[in-house]
Image: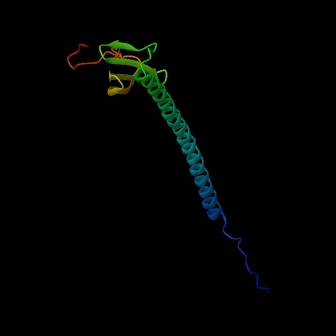
Amino acid sequence: MRDKKRISPPAIGGISLLVAFAVLCLTIFALLSLATVRANLRLADASVKGVTDYYAADLEAQAILARLRAGERVDGVTVNGAVYSFICPISDTQNLEAAVLLDGADYRILRWQAVPSQSWQADETLDIWDGDGTTF
């Protein structure tokens, strides 16, 4: 009788599943990283635009202040005694408001502030339950 050796095939089923799962996990992590990078890029672009817009409005306000100190009359500037007030738009939602006290060539900045261009309106359309069956 001949000895028959039984040769069993290598057990690659479990290892193949483990490798496929690892590749799938790494692919998902790569896609999540890509989405995070894109979101960070959008945020950075918005930040750059906001800073650029603010400094453009600041430059315009500085130019108006220089003209006022030189004694010129500037359109859009309101005068209340020795206090000169003006607004420079930063964006659709923000303005740079400035108020300057002028005394000849000397000046003192009373206000130099970025403020919302529109007043905030509370949304009162949602009925809230107060616990006793009535809403207010």
Q: Which residue lies at the image location 33% right of the left edge and 22% below the top edge?
A: 102
Image quadrant holding the C terminus, namely top left
Visible in this render: residue 52?
yes
Query: Which of 122/82 is in front?
Result: 82
Q: Is residue 120 above or below residue 14?
A: above
Query: Which of 54/131 is in front?
Result: 54
Visible in this render: residue 95?
no
Image quadrant holding the N terminus, namely bottom right
x%, y% of residue 32? Answer: 56, 46
Q: Is residue 116 above or below residue 11?
A: above
Q: Is residue 81 above or below residue 30?
A: above
Q: How is the image coloured?
A: rainbow
x%, y% of residue 83? Answer: 31, 18
Query: Which of 22/13 is in front?
Result: 22
x%, y% of residue 33? Answer: 56, 48
Taking the image as shown, residue 82 lies to the left or right of residue 88, namely left
Q: How many marks?
A: 0
x%, y% of residue 127? Answer: 31, 15
Q: Is residue 51 above or below residue 23?
A: above
Farthest residue in the bottom direction? 1
Q: Quadrant of residue 26?
A: bottom right
Farthest residue in the left direction? 132
Q: Quadrant of residue 42?
A: top right
Taking the image as shown, residue 13 lies to the left or right of residue 5, namely left
Q: Which residue lies at the image location 52% right of the left edge and 40% below the top edge?
A: 44
